[in-house]
Image: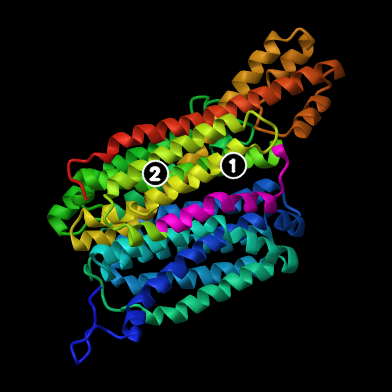
Amino acid sequence: MNRAVSNSGMEPAATSRLARLAPLIVLACAQVGTSADNGAFSVAMAEMMRVFGCPLSDVQMASTVYSLMAGTFMLASGLLGMVIGWCRNFRAGLVLAVVGELLCAFSPSIELLIWGGRLMVGLGASLIIPSVLGMVSMLYEGEERKQAYGVIAASAALATIIPIALGILVDIAGFRVTFGVLAAYFVALLVASAKLPTGGGLHAGKFDAPGAVIASLGLFAVMCGLSRISTWGVFAPLPQAPFTIAGISPALPIVGVGLLLLVMLIPVEHWMERTHGIAILPSSFVRNPTVRAGVIAIALPFFYMGAQGLVGTSYYQLVIGLGGMQTALLGIISGVPMLVLAMFVPRKFPQLKPWSVVRTGYVFMAAACVSMAFGVRASELTPIMVVGTLFGGVGVGLVNSQANNIVASAVPPSDAQQSGGIQGAARNLGLALGSAAMGSVLLIAVNTGLDARIDASNVVDTQSKAALEEVVYTYESDAAFTARLESMGVAPEAQGELLADNAEVRAKSAATAFYVVAGLAVVALATTFPKQTS
């Protein structure tokens, strides 16, 4: 960002420095706000079920709708900000967030909360996040940009700490007051957005409508399919699947359609850029190996967090028996290094080579997953599990300290601003893919393992074997598994053996999931040597 110089030619006064930092403070607070919303929703799920008298599936649908809306329009929002101006794009997102939070606070039914509140907040996030990343590229250059991206990454890391305070607020005042507080927070950000530069976009009067439609449909299909794998099934359809395709679950075919649309987007965008001078996905993003490697570096930490959120949280709560607040407190172990490293590595160690930092982060993430793979074999919180959680926070913090700036620095200035859309999409896809992929690993591993144990058992009678082998099992607690066996009329003498089998299969399944993530982190090391380095 350009420095203001006083009439005497001396360095800017402290007030000038604050003026230069004011936009970054607003943008960081906006990033905190979107993280806080997710945290508030997570810790309020139990109370919403009680107030609305709805099942867990309804509350999970509310979470899915938010993720779908936030992820679907990221690429389109990245271009929209270039057309109408980043500040207008940012403020439009804040307005949608305010309306959505108020709907969540005052909804008389879970249906309005889902299709009104969560949908609106998700749309707001799809405008806010690319605007935050785009304005950082617009306002800052060089080392200042690297440090600014570090601040934004550190703000996102607060998502692992914020639920503690929000959980206390939910316990004291309820979820309605909590969402009302978030609405007031976004209103305050609207007022503070006066500190942001206004003006038209670089592509005023132009918009890539074909690209926006294809990208949004493709992202929607991918996100929708990924989010429904655990509910609809991986290959064999579960009872909740609304329909089947050639006898299999519709989840993966929907993902396939989405990926096909995203592949089709590339030639369409090449034509749009050549004939109209504008594209939702500029060729500099597709052809530049540094950008491609940087997008992987953006997505992988969120993939890890999605996997950790599903496998780790399931282990903490279903096996160890930790409550929501205890799980959130455990998140501090990873959240603090995420926050500290993302913010201070670019500021205190600017001489470090970005890709070297990213490689180190990948190694820490792989080590974290290996540690946790050993830890989940126990039925209590072990030191190695804590160490793994810590290593994961270090790895994510190191990668996040560099990834956004790697992408923005590898393309021309105008494309750097627009990269906020693709960076936001990479975040959301990484998070969704991590949760869905590891959910699929758990689902397949648990069912395959238990079916083999049941078939080999000498204690379970033939009739019970036939019934048990028709069941689709989930990663569940001992109490839930025992209740399932009792409801099916399994003999008491067989229940003990099956309970031990389930515990062993469950541990191996979780360990397998962590080993898969560790393997992906190791494979990702090969992408950190692009031909064009930043």
**Residue appearing at x 62%, y 43% in the figure:** 313
Task: Say whether residue 404 is left or right of residue 508.
Answer: left
Q: Is any atom of residue 305 visible in this view?
A: no
Name the N-terminal-most of marks 2 and 1: 2
Provide the secondary structure element on which disc 1 rests: helix
Residue 516 screen position, x and y as percent: 47, 30
Provide the secondary structure element on which disc 2 rests: helix
Residue 246 screen position, x and y as percent: 49, 25
Q: Is any atom of residue 465 visible in this view?
A: yes
Magenta range: 320-342
Dot label at residue 386:
1
Q: How many marks?
A: 2
Q: Main secondary structure of the magenta part?
A: helix
Between the C-alphas of marks 2 and 1, the distance is: 18 Å
Residue 430 is drawn in which quadrant? Answer: top left
Q: Is residue 340 magenta?
A: yes
Residue 476 is drawn in which quadrant? Answer: top right
Q: Residues within 10 Å of mark 1 (few under 14, many from 20)?
A: some
Identify the image quadrant of the N terminus.
bottom left
Q: Nearer the viewer, residue 263 or 506?
A: 506
Dot label at residue 454:
none
Read off the residue under disc 2: 361
Residue 419 screen position, x and y as percent: 29, 57
Q: Residues within 10 Å of mark 2 (few under 14, many from 20)?
A: many
Picture colour scheme = rainbow
Farthest residue in the left direction? 274
Looking at the picture, which amino acid does disc 2 mark?
Gly
Farthest residue in the right direction? 492
**Is 240 drawn above or below residue 398 in the view shown?**
above
Looking at the picture, which amino acid does disc 1 mark?
Val
**Residue appearing at x 72%, y 34% in the figure:** 477
